[in-house]
Amino acid sequence: MNQLTTDRLLRASVATSIDAIICTDERRKITFFNHGAEAMFGYSAEEMMGKPLDVLIPHRFQAAHREHVEKFGASRQATRLMGERREVSGLRKDGTEFPAAASIAQVTLDGEHAYSVVLRDVTEQHRFEQENSELVRELRAAVVARDDMLGIVSHDLRNPVNAVKMLAAAIVRAGETASLPPVVAEHAGVLLQAARQMDALIQDLLDVSRLESGRMTMAPRPVAMTELVATATSLLAPAAEEAGVRLTSSVSGSLPQVDVDPDRMVQALSNLVSNAVKYTPSGGRVDVNAQVDGDIVRVSVEDTGVGIPEAELHRVFDRFWQSRRTNRSGAGLGLTIVRGIVRAHGGRIWIESRPGEGTKVHFSVPRAARADA
Ligand SMILES: Nc1ncnc2c1ncn2[C@@H]1O[C@H](COP(=O)(O)OP(=O)(O)O)[C@@H](O)[C@H]1O
Ligand SMILES: [Mg+2]
């Protein structure tokens, strides 16, 4: 392609560009105004020839703009690219203003300065950005409202559910000494069981909302992890036995103490052991292991259960998430709470799993200062 062809092509591109391309002489008089500029500003090229550039700039920006261009002229920079400098405002023939991204170039020939400016109307982009940030703000507000609502509802449900639980328990106890109609004794037992489930769910909802808002208080003190593991496994021993799952712990007695809130740590451990038991078929095994590693103690709960597909692993800690493959008997809050508790202690939690082979959840917590150990 020879130089003449290239020049013509360039000229044609400039003429047809949808960006506005405008050239001025040293005194800011317009010498070129392409189709893009005509469309953007509403003036014809004819009427703009020789007019001052200021016609296209809102009055309040004219002085600043002039200064800007003079500085640019004094510099030896040949071009200043779009986005590299702050946005400008354009003024249309009909008096409306619009935001534009601008790049300018300059040449000096025979001691005379000339400028070209390429402008892109960014009105749409602005509208889009603004709509997006409004959406984000609305979404955040909706999430906060939902969490507040969850907190309030669970809090207010607690008392009535507790009343049902206590009265049902009282009837069950009465049935042990006095003779009640069998149907009453039986129904009271079912009521008690249902009220306990509701209570546990409410407790989980409250814990999640407290953990996420940072309102859950932790009272860490030096305690023996061995004892916490023993407490959690004995809590789950009946469920394991009923499920035909062998539950063991391999925690050495010489394990150093850890710096944790004992109640919260037992809650975390029992959630993990309960999952392991729940998702392991009869005949399987669950083992709780703990080891010291420098300043931390690493705990793992391992099972030989159904496992979790790799594609779903990253979701297990999300609240309310449950695999479609497992029966959804809980609320999907357990692992969210465990992670919250571990993190509140400055620890980490992670999970490994192979479908059909089993799952291993690991977490770490800080060991107690050696002087206390
Ligand atoms: N040990 C495990 N083996 C297999 N799947 C598990 C295990 N632990 C958790 N999961 C999966 O992760 C989901 C979320 O667990 P969790 O947060 O404790 O909720 P929930 O137990 O109430 O369903 C479970 O529904 C299950 O699909
Ligand atoms: Mg669970």
Image (tube, rainbow, N blue to C red):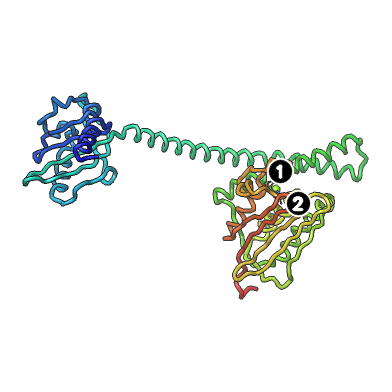
Q: Which residue is mark 2?
A: 305
Query: Could you tell me if residue 162 is visible in this image?
Result: no
148 and 235: which is toward the camera: 235
Q: Secondary structure at mark 1?
A: loop
- Res 231 → quadrant: bottom right
Q: Residue at x 67, y 46 (%)?
A: 203
Q: Which residue is mark 1?
A: 330
Give the amino acid at mark 1: Gly
- Say if 286 sits above or below 212 in the image: below
Q: Residue at x 26, y 40 (%)?
A: 87
Left or right, residue 67 beside residue 342: left
Quarter placement of the N terminus = top left
236 and 78: which is toward the camera: 78
- Res 256 → quadrant: bottom right
Left or right, residue 159 beside residue 88: right
Neighbour tally class for label 2: few under 14, some 14-19, many 20 plus, Cα within 10 Å? many
Q: Residue at x 75, y 60 (%)?
A: 287
Does the closest atom of ligand 1 sit within 8 Å of the Cβ of label 2? yes
Give the percent coordinates (x, y) of residue 144: 52, 40
Give the percent coordinates (x, y) of residue 99: 27, 35
Quarter placement of the C terminus = bottom right
Neighbour tally class for label 1: few under 14, some 14-19, many 20 plus, Cα within 10 Å? few
Does the closest atom of ligand 1 sit within 8 Å of the Cβ of label 1? yes
Give the amino acid at mark 2: Gly
Calculate the distance from the C-alpha at mark 1 to the C-alpha at mark 2. Answer: 17 Å
**How many numbered marks does the figure carry?**
2
Which badge, 1 or 2, is on the more N-terminal residue?
2
